[in-house]
Image (spheres, rainbow, N blue to C red):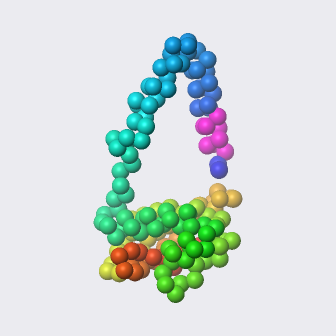
């Protein structure tokens, strides 16, 4: 994690601590209620909007890239996100990165390409690689996941 994030979080915590110190007991009692009302407490009004990358296929590919992070360290999940007959990358190497969309997927029939942003968890280095995908049945699978 870059240092500036830690500094920002520390600053926010200090601001919140100072705010709480200056509040009286009635204000402190109302604070949780106010947080629930403003936060929505998981209501549909505050739910995240669904992924929209220009179509159902592109959206599934975006979700598949997110699933790559969840699959790290789990060989069953790793095999499930890769196309049949494709050997997933070496887990030790694959697990050292975080994956996210680097652009909108380009879908052409049963194949697709997408630039994937790859963050090195240890060094903080960021790179972009083009991954290829193939449609199997109703879903998409990773055909080639290039790593830095």
Q: Is residue 128 visible?
A: no
User: Which region shows up in magenta?
Assistant: 3-10
**Residue 116, position in %: x, y?**
49, 67
Residue sitting nearer the eye, 86 or 93: 86
Left or right: residue 56 compared with residue 65: left
**Residue 77, position in %: x, y?**
55, 71
Residue at image coords 43%, 71%: 114
Residue at image coords 37%, 57%: 51
**Residue 31, position in %: x, y?**
49, 23
What is the count of numbered marks? 0
Residue at image coords 58%, 26%: 16
Looking at the image, residue 8 lies above or below residue 69: above
Q: Is residue 101 visible?
A: yes
Residue at image coords 48%, 20%: 30
Left or right: residue 8 compared with residue 108: right
Magenta-colored segment: predominant secondary structure: helix
Q: Is 8 colored magenta in this rendering?
A: yes
Tell me where residue 104 sits by quadrant. bottom left
Residue sitting nearer the eye, 46 or 133: 46
Quadrant assignment for the C terminus: bottom right
Q: Is 54 colored magenta in this rendering?
A: no
């Amino acid at each position: 994690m870059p240092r500036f994030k830690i500094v920002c979080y520390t600053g926010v915590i200090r601001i919140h601590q100072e705010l709480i110190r200056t509040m009286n007991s009635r204000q402190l009692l109302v604070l949780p209620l106010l947080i629930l009302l403003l936060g929505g407490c998981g209501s549909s009004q505050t739910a995240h909007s669904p992924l929209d990358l220009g179509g159902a296929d592109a959206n599934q590919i975006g979700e598949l890239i997110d699933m790559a992070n969840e699959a790290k360290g789990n060989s069953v999940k790793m095999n499930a996100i890769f196309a049949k007959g494709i050997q997933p990358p070496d887990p030790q190497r694959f697990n050292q990165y975080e994956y996210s969309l680097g652009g909108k997927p380009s879908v052409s029939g049963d194949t697709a390409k997408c630039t994937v942003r790859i963050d090195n968890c240890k060094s903080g280095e960021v790179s972009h690689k083009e991954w290829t995908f193939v449609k199997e049945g109703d879903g998409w699978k990773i055909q080639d996941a290039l790593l830095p």
